[in-house]
Image (cartoon, rainbow, N blue to C red):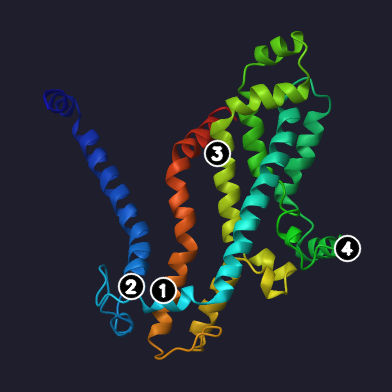
Amino acid sequence: MGKLAASWRRKTPSDIVFFCFTHFFVFFVMIITLYPFVFIASASISDPGMVTRMEVWLFPKGINFDSYERVIKEEQLWVSYRNTIWYVLVGTTINLVMTTLLAYPLSRRRFQGRRILMIAITFTMFFSGGMVPSFILVRSLGLINTRWALVIPSAISTYYLIITRTFFEGIPESMHEMATIDGAGELRIFIQMFLPLSMPILATLTLFYAVGHWNAYFIAMLYLSREYLYPLQIFLRKILLMYEANDLMLDIQLDRRDISRTIRYATIMISTLPIICVYPFVQKYFVKGVMIGAIKG
């Protein structure tokens, strides 16, 4: 307490004002960011009538789990869940392998032509072929209505590639030279030296790519027309659109129109909770990886 009081005495009035304003602003942003999630969680287990009458603001009222029971009984939900898990696992694996394999040679200063190649790759961040040429390319490759249409075209993100290359460049060149002198090849150096030292950036890439695959729905709308291949977000989108049209949700027979609102909230909770539960375990790597990539860029 004495050190804290002494530190406050050393602060000028402007420092105190700035400190209080910053903390108040951060607290305000936290509240407005957290409130929608808390409201949806409360509304999903509240009485449908109270939710419709807008009597639920923060805490649940009239605890009711009928919405979750109806959503869980929907077969298409679990089909979409399995598809999304496949897209996340396979897609993220492909993303990590392709991104690191390309970032490693681009980070080596002795690699001839890396500047030209990097310029060509960066060019794609600002100019792309567009939606129609991309669709034509995917169709010509025979990927339409296949699972690979959601993971192959997005195998590498240019932005994440640049971050990864920047991280690799921060690893001392002397380590690479010593391994080369000992007779290690590039593949062995990459697997046994660079990857173990790159856990922060790998965790960051895993989080970014996994969240991207989990939330992807537009690319699925373009390349998929068979329901058994739909990801979870397409299922969620269908529910939201049907609710807005005051229609029934898929094959679920609703007793009251009020419950359609809580069903929507329950579906949102079911579709977002897994990725939220994973985030705390990789948060420290996420922050460290982003900061290192930014500082050394």
Q: Looking at the picture, how far across and down is residue 264, in whole percent? A: 45, 76
Which residue is nearer to you in this view: 21 or 208? 208
* Residue in the picture at 67% in, 74% down: 227
Q: Are marks 2 and 1 in contact (CB under 8 Å)?
A: yes
- The first of marks 2 and 4 along the sequence is 2
Point out which mark residue 203 bears.
3
How far is the residue under mark 3 from the one under mark 4? 34 Å
How far is the residue under mark 2 from the one under mark 4? 47 Å
Point out which mark residue 140 bears.
4
Which amino acid is tagged 4?
Answer: Ser
Q: Secondary structure at mark 1?
A: helix
Q: Secondary structure at mark 3?
A: helix
Q: Looking at the picture, how far across and down is residue 58, in whole percent? A: 26, 68
Point out which mark residue 45 bears.
2
Q: Are marks 3 and 1 in contact (CB under 8 Å)?
A: no
Mark 2, residues whose alpha carbon is within 10 Å: few (<14), some, or many (≥20)? Answer: many
Q: Nearer the viewer, mark 3 or mark 2?
A: 2
How far is the residue under mark 1 from the one under mark 4? 42 Å
- Placement of the C terminus among the 4 image quadrants: top right
Q: Which residue is mark 1?
A: 68
